[in-house]
Image: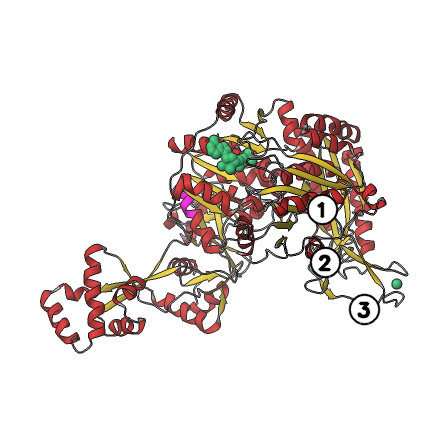
Amino acid sequence: MGLFEDNNKDFFYTDVVLPFPLRKAFTYKVPHEFTDKIEIGKRAIVQFGKRKIYTALIVKIHKQKPEKYKAKEVLDILDEQPIIYSKQLKLWQWIADYYCSSVGEVMAVALPPSLKLESESKVIINPEYDGDITNLTQNEIIITESIVNQNELSLSQIQDILKIKNIFHIIKSLYQHGIILPKEELKDTYKVKKEKFVELNPEYKDENKLKNLFTELEKAPKQLDVILSYQSMFKKAKKISQKELIKISGASSQIIKSLEKKKILIIKSVKVDRIEKEKYKKESFELKDFQQKALEEIKIQFEKKNVVLLHGITSSGKTHLYINLIEDLISKGQQVLYLVPEISLTAQLIRRLRNYFGNKIGIYHSKFNPNERYEIWHKTLNQEYSIVLGVRSAMFLPFKKLGLIIIDEEHESTFKQQNPAPRYQARDTAVVMTSIFDCKCLLGTATPSFETYFNTKTKKYGYVKIDRRFTDVQPPEIILSDLKDEYKRKKMKGHFGSKLYEEANKIIKKNDQVIFFQNRRGYAPYIECQTCGWVPKCKNCDISLTYHMISRTLSCHYCGYKTAIPTKCDNCGNTQMKMKGFGTEKIEDDLEVLFPGIEGIRMDYDTTRKKKAYHKLISKFEKGEAQILVGTQMVTKGFDFEKVKLVGILNADQMLNYPDFRAVERSYQLISQVSGRAGRRKERGKVIVQTFTPEHPAFIFIQANDFEGFYNLYMKERRGFKYPPLTKLILISLKDKSQTKVSEGGEFLAKRLKLKLGKRVLGPEAPPISKLRNLYINQIMLKFERDNALIKNAKETLIDEISKFNFDTRYKSIRVVIDVDPY
Ligand code: ADP
Ligand code: ZN
Ligand code: ZN
């Protein structure tokens, strides 16, 4: 070392990913002591900048000394085993490139927080920590005590306390002992599960000592009871929990404590699996002929194609086909990733799958806390889980032998991550994963996205259709209710036309259930002064405030801003304010008048915010404790209630008229999805769609359940306007506190881009909501023909232009966001 260091060609270098939005790798030198330990996929501790220390991920090992700078040394290697495989790294790289993001940003969403330590990370004491320090080192004890005293510490503070730089092993060990937790993302509902286990001090293995103990305890009969119970329990099980011991001996925990004090009993806290291991019963089922046929068809298609669309109407039994395919794969030792939209990850679905796969299936929810995420990460890595059922981000888990990806409800827009970067589309990414992992991907839906359907037409994807339901019940009858006419004839009751009102009454009388769908929460979307038309707006956003009756507030659904309901108009002082439009709260309010004495449930973002609230409401409805369910999107999918015979869509126009080229496609999907909730078994259900425009062509196809016809008609429109899937879009948003600056910046950037990309550049333009969270927005849209090479080049140009733009002193403050395939 020292003098010869620079001449020594034998040093290894490593490229690592750091959690920054920078589009390059950083090279560090590997000191000899780590030559054996270094491995791709492990975490390294490195210094970045003057002082800060990070965990970085090793992505490449080579002998290329960087030419432009002197490489710093890797300080340590944190892992014994890689925490991800090389395939995940490929995936990260693809996402970073395709979505104009960076590998560092991908890593930030991919790794659970406990695997990403850095100087500024803060740690806190695990609320369940019982103060036990027996197995800790001196430094670990010092840190534990400091955190107890100060509530939280950043890693750099811990460095200062111990006066050593590399504290990451200590942090890792404290995590593993369950003593500390990462502070970020910690939810208040969170609890680590630990259980206390009791052991008789091994001293008493000696017969004589044990006899003496019994005599000694004669004076303390309650304590003696405990020991006797312990002895008899010990014959049956070697691990005895304190809880059981208390139950069987009838002793108080006080008595157990005193036995612990006397060193007769030893009590240890042991971490139990946080992810619930429920009891399950193995169920079996047989596929019907038409299902079996579809299954075979899928397998045949998979021989030629990596991706197959399963286009099966609701209740055709798609889930059962998935189960069959999963069983096939896991019997071959492969893993399966099963992605669903957040709202479809229902207790019902989890229960169904647990019944088949027991503890081989891991569930991955976005509400999971850091430790749950850490646990599922490890179980996937070690292949304890053969199946992971989860939301979008579950695709980052470290699968080793991925054989199949299932994307259920593939048309759902929630597969797209909006913020932060990487703004990836999980369905599209899954398609790319088939070549990285050499696996298959099955897309399932009753209402394909145009994008996917297009890909089946061009034969890029295979296609399998089921148009029968599992039970031979016909799909629900879709009835249009013309609100123009209802209003004219004065037949409206609140927001219910006579058709919906009368049909709902019939169903309720028969003791069945109904669902009312209104895709707006709150009481009224806005209020307006009756004299001058003034509308209260959010002070941070360019949007009107929603009236909430129950919380008595006006609230912004974009930034969360809340304010009291004004007693008079800000503009003219008039006290008459009128409510405009209606949301779920208003419908709930109407129920009391229109269906007196009938129990109703409202399900929307406001009533389901708490962790278990959603499940409580669902189970209440499932048990029949309520006959009416009013809700937003949340009521449209996933569940399967026998007694729901009618679905009412209160206002379909609002969906159809939404300013987006996908509005009609979305409406079709949404209406079909909600319809799928009606009359799933026994008798045919009904759907009543209320609209002012019953002549809208979309309804004809919805009524006829004719997706093909619908697709053909609206693809003409897409072709005419050159919209996706015939083209590809990239949306560039500029955001700044100053409105003039953002529009000048937009003009400037658009002009620059037009020089290179010509007519493919559209805008700049202020979007319909031109200000959000106090930032003004201006947007440029890029529209490309479907030509991958061209788009790839354009992305490079774009990144280049944006980085120049951000160097320009005039526009430095403007935040530029790139969104590839922005829908
Ligand atoms: P989809 O996902 O296509 O809407 P599901 O898989 O939810 O349909 O099936 C609808 C209903 O039919 C469920 O209650 C399911 O349990 C039942 N079902 C479907 N296929 C079978 C089968 N082969 N055996 C038993 N029950 C089935
Ligand atoms: Zn007014
Ligand atoms: Zn707002």
| Mark 3 residue crowding within 10 angstroms, few (<14) / some (14–19) / many (20+) | few
Looking at numbered disc 1 in the image, what kind of residue is underneath it?
A: Tyr
Position of the C terminus, as image quadrant, is top right
Occupied quadrant, residue 194: bottom left
Q: Quadrant of ligand 3?
A: bottom right
The residue closer to the viewer here, 797 or 515, is: 515
Q: CA distance from mark 3 to mark 2?
A: 18 Å
Looking at numbered disc 3 in the image, what kind of residue is underneath it?
A: Thr
Q: Is residue 662 left or right of residue 29?
A: right
Q: Which residue is tagged 2?
A: 556
Q: Is residue 698 left or right of residue 432?
A: right
Instruction: Please state the horizontal and vertical placement of residue 440, each as a whole percent of the image.
Output: 50, 30
Counting residues from the N terminus, which is met first, the one under dot 3 or under dot 1?
1
Mark 2 vs ligand 3: CB below 8 Å: yes
Instruction: Please state the horizontal and vertical placement of residue 73, each as a whole percent of the image.
Output: 46, 52
Q: Is residue 430 visible?
A: no
- Identify the secondary structure beneath mark 2: loop
Q: Say which mark, if any, is on residue 501.
A: 1
SS majority, magenta: helix
Q: Say which mark, if any, is on residue 567.
A: 3
Q: Which residues are drawn in magenta?
A: 378-382
The residue closer to the viewer here, 692 or 769, is: 692
Above or below: residue 766 compared with residue 137: above
